[in-house]
Image (tube, grey):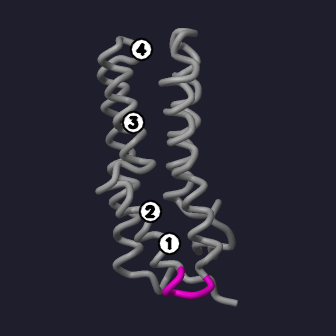
Amino acid sequence: MEKQPIKSHEDLEVYKMAFDVSMRIFELSKTFPVEERYSKTFQIRRSSRSVCANMAEAWRKGRYEAAFVAKLNDYVRGACRRQAEAAETQTWLKFAVKCNYLNAETTRELYSTYNRILSILITIINNPSPWIIKR
């Protein structure tokens, strides 16, 4: 079976993974207490969605290798060092467990997914050529 060419960021497995985990977080966060609506609920939803948005933006800049790598580097560096989107989501997940809004097993799964997403992005950064949009 021949692999289909990647025509959009939505074709990337890492994007699909990030989108799916974001939607799972959205569904799980519906059970958070009403008093957390503007704190944990909003923050965890925003940060998890931002992971997908950043990937989409990086993909669109993928016409030029330097711009593509720079955007992904900004994203990964921020996530790892400055508690940006993926790391921020992981932090909100920890709060949700400590506040008994989510169970530990579910949170471990979600946290692990974000670690895989970051790992894939680092792999792409280290070898960007296959990911550059060919026009």
- Residue 46 in the image: state x and y as whole percent: 56, 39
Assign a secondary structure to mark 3. Answer: helix
Q: Earlier in the sequence, mark 4 or mark 1?
A: 1
Disc 1 crowd rating (10 Å Cα; few below 14, some 14-19, many 20+) is many
Q: Nearer the viewer, mark 1 or mark 3?
A: 1
- The three-letter amino acid code for the residue at tag 2 is Tyr
Q: What's the distance in space between the residues labelled 1 and 3, CA to CA?
A: 24 Å
Residue depicted at 35% across the width and 48% down the height: 83
Of the residues tagged 4 and 1, which is closer to the observer?
1
Task: Kindly identify the amino acid type of the residue bearing the numbered disc 3.
Answer: Leu
In the picture, the disc for residue 43 is none
Q: As displayed, is residue 108 above or below residue 11?
A: above
Q: How many marks?
A: 4
Q: What's the residue at 55%, 56% (across, down)?
A: 15
Q: Is residue 99 above or below residue 60?
A: above
Please state the horizontal and vertical placement of residue 101, each as a whole percent of the image.
41, 14
Q: Earlier in the sequence, mark 3 or mark 4?
A: 4
Disc 1 from disc 2: Cα separation: 6 Å
Residue 101: image tag = 4
Labels 1 & 2 near each other (Cβ < 8 A): yes
The residue type indicated by label 1 comes to Lys
Question: Can residue 66 be found in the magenta stretch?
Answer: yes
Q: Which residues are magenta?
A: 63-67
Task: Return the residue at label 1.
Answer: 71
Q: Which residue does the numbered mark 2 point to in the structure image?
A: 75
Which residue is denoted by mark 3 in the rendering?
Answer: 110
SS of the residue under disc 1? helix
Mark 4 touches mark 1? (CB < 8 Å): no
**Depth check, front residue: 116 or 84:** 84
Amino acid at the residue labelled 4: Tyr
Res 104 → quadrant: top left
Q: Are the residues at dot 4 and dot 2 in contact (C-beta closer than 8 Å)?
A: no
